[in-house]
Image (cartoon, rainbow, N blue to C red):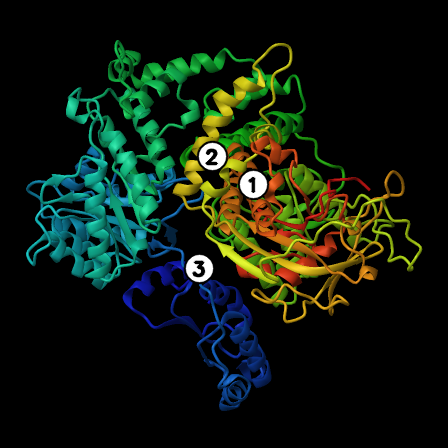
Amino acid sequence: TTGTMLLGSEIAAALTALEPLGIDMIGLNCATGPGEMSEHLRYLAAHARVGVSCEPNAGLPVLGSDGARYPLTPAQLADAHDRFTREFGLSLVGGCCGTTPEHIAALAERVAGRPAGRRRPRPEPGVASLYQHVPFRQDTAFLAIGERTNANGSKAFREALLEGTYEDCVEIARAQTRDGAHLLDVCVDYVGRDGVADMREVAGRLATAATLPVVLDSTEPAVIEAGLELTGGRAVVNSVNYEDGDGPDSRLARVMPMVREHGAAVIALTIDERGQARTAEWKLQVAERLAADLTGTWGMRLEDIIVDCLTFPIATGQEETRRDAVETIEAIAELKRRYPDVQTTLGVSNVSFGLKPAARAVLNSVFLAECVRAGLDSAIVHAARIMPIARIPDEQRQAALDLVYDRRRPGYDPLAALMELFEGVDAAALKASRAAELAGLPLWERLKRRIIDGERAGLEADLDEALAQRPALEIVNDVLLDGMKTVGELFGSGQMQLPFVLTSAEVMKAAVAYLEPHMERSGEIGKGTIVLATVKGDVHDIGKNLVDIILSNNGYDVVNIGIKQPISAIVAAAADNDADVIGMSGLLVKSTVVMRDNLAELNSRGLARRWPVLLGGAALTRAYVEQDLAALFDGEVRYARDAFEGLRLMDAAMAVKRGMPGAKLPEPRTRRVKAAASKPDRAPEPGTVARSDVSTDVPVPTPPFLGTEVVKGIPLADYAALLDERALFLGQWGLKPSRGGGTSYAELVETEGRPRLRMWLERVQTERLLAAAVVYGYFRCVSSGNDLIIVSPERGGQGGSSPRASSDGGRELERFTFPRQRRDRRLCLADFFRDRASGDPDVVAFQLVTMGPRISAATAELFAKNAYREYLELHGLSVQLTEALAEYWHARIRRELGIAAADPDDIEGFFRVGYQGARYSFGYPACPDLADRAKVVRLLRPSRIGVELSEEMQLHPEQSTDAIVVHHPAAKYFSV
């Protein structure tokens, strides 16, 4: 109940290990009072599929003259459980040490008979060691399964095994942890050895000496069973297949009962009775058979099945092997499309067997990158030997890509080209070449490259040279941080793997540590105290440590409590050190959720106003912190983009605390909404409005119904033709021609725009990102001065009611007041509808279209991953597709009203509004008041298509638009 069990198991590891065993409930019991349990109950409530329970002590014991006593009263225990049952949906509550019959009676009186609160758990599929949970899906990276604890793949491990020096086996496992592996592939199979005995020795030691979960890899079921019996947490079994069928004596039938008994996950190979699947079609057939069998016969969840689509050497020169890599890539992509919950893995290094080590490293890295792009979730690799794509020379990368995709042509064989590039080249020569290249760069570029490449040799000499020219703090801020920014961008776009990020961070730390004695410290001391922590589940601390250095050198006391810190530890440190501010950091996308939960926990504990909170990290955005998180937090929270903004915020927070005149924290950034061109005129007195010259003596079309209708599942093909390419390429994607005779816009469209557009249109369909839907309706209306009044029909007002209305216009439903031009024609949108005084009602249509939530989530995910180009392109495309859908539906409304005869014959005509009537969106000049959206929402009820209106009057998902549709022939766009 302090977040870990006595052995050190974190709560996520316990949940991951226990839930697959068929438990009915999981909870917290004893050790502390309810206040200390809140954070951990929040985690269980958010992730556990089973019921959650809580039986706390009556607080933490307090020593007095009569010995220890428990301070919590019956009413206080009941208060705590009252909140827990409401917030966390507990299924069972009670008390432990220090609670009495009176405590339980008060608790029963408060919550007995209350239905368990509804929870919507978000399980995080994965595995666990005795100590920690590791999710299958990693932020901006693949799950790296270390291959060096394998007797068949690692000479060092094999020799340690043969010599019986099992502690050396453990040290190899620890080294893989440092290299950035997430799981350990453990294989002790070796001819002439007792595999069961070896597995017991190795697995028994790794259970307590290694922090990473294990993949038990053996061809012998008895060896796997020995490993499962000694492994703490939840393991992965490697593997099952159909090589000997699926009968009662098959390997599948012998291994799967063990998997089920121990609640393990399983790697399933695409091998059947015919052999190892070589083509994409064959691989998919076996994968689908495995998925059906493992879920149907053995009761596994899809998310716990890890399919290995198999890798084969492509450098043998044999014709039948040339397409093996591309077949694997295609199989992964299609498998993920059909079964998005299934995990995928590969033994990557097989692809390069037969090449020289230097060439193997390049081919392995390029092939892995292409597989990850296709949807690969994990890979069995030596993580430290995978090269960042950005570090591979272009000609090597291109040759490797051509080999992977079998791009042979007359006179060109990519295998020969790749081998020629590495002729006479070994790893030492490559390293010397890179060192020479680095030495030839200018000093400042060289320092930046050292950070990006993680190259420490020669660092101190370069820093000495730099110190002779610039102050230490300037070197950190202008040069080294710029290098780390590039590292973050490469990591976010998938071009640099986590092990290399860590290497870069180590070089950055070394550089800053070397420069720190040369930094001028502020003359002030004791200016204030901040507690800094990397949040729970995140091990990245370079950004936090930079904040530590900058604040420390400016007179602040910094209590840096390290990585993976739960909110309870952060609060304890802040209280113990009488902190003035709390700072939380994290690199991973999931850390943004942890920060949100931490703020909620501070609210729950009544501590939100005690400490201002500063948040920083690569996955955060200012909008997320200062809008979304600020809205739920009862205290002050701000976003610090870097260490220097953190310093400015710390200065401001301390000025506020000391009561300095005019002191305040910077205002949170608010969402930008389109400003009204002018405020709508107040409703005018009758007879005082000088109307425009718009004639209202035009026919009123007959709508097909009055009220609203919902249409979902609109195919992309229906509205894609109305996509405005120019608005997309120029306005959204920024494909602007070069000045001075460079690349023209037409060339950019053909070489960049349309190829990328085709790719994205295929991708949004393949990944099922679109959920196009519309809610629209027709309403009776009349105008009065600057007002458009929506009135009820003669009968009802929902879909299918009569289109006739009473002569007086019926009951008022909503009233829109629009601005009027103060000059020119004095136009007002209300002028396009019949006046109430005429006695004849008019008709108006409203529409609201959306692309659905999935594409919005996909763009947010790309942004969070720092995949900025893809984010820009997908976001821009989603916006323009929304406009295309709005244009398409407007055309349908014109057809339904019988006014489509004037519609243009070409697409450009639509973009020029060459049809009868017009469509006006709120927030634009003719109807600028965004508050009118609330009226449209009341009329259309768009929640039926998943669209909500925020307090800022913005539609969510973002890819949604609303409009008032006017049928009048004279209706055109105008400014007020």
Amino acid type, residue under disc 2 in the picture: Phe
Q: Residue at x 49, y 51 (%)?
A: 564
Left or right: where does residue 19 sit relative to residue 474? left
Secondary structure, mark 2, is helix
Amino acid type, residue under disc 3 in the picture: Arg
Q: Nearer the viewer, mark 1 or mark 2?
A: 1
Mark before the other along the chain sequence, 2 or 3: 3
Q: Nearer the viewer, mark 2 or mark 3?
A: 3
Q: Residues within 10 Å of mark 1 (few under 14, many from 20)?
A: many
In 3D space, how far apart are the residues under numbered discs 2 and 3 (Cα atoms)?
26 Å
Amino acid type, residue under disc 1 in the picture: Ala
Q: Residues within 10 Å of mark 2 (few under 14, many from 20)?
A: many
Q: Could one spot residue 463 in this view of the protein? A: yes
Q: Residue at x 52, y 75 (%)?
A: 85
In 3D space, how far apart are the residues under numbered discs 3 and 1 (Cα atoms)?
34 Å
In this view, 182 is above or below 200:
above
Please name whichever residue, 707 or 352, is drawn nearer the observer in this view of the structure: 707
Q: Which residue is mark 3?
A: 122
Residue 884: assigned label: 1
In this view, 800 is above or below 574:
below
Secondary structure, mark 3, is loop
In this view, 861 is above or below 368:
below
Q: Which residue is mark 2?
A: 491
Q: Could one spot residue 957 in this view of the protein? A: no
Q: Quadrant of the C terminus?
A: top right
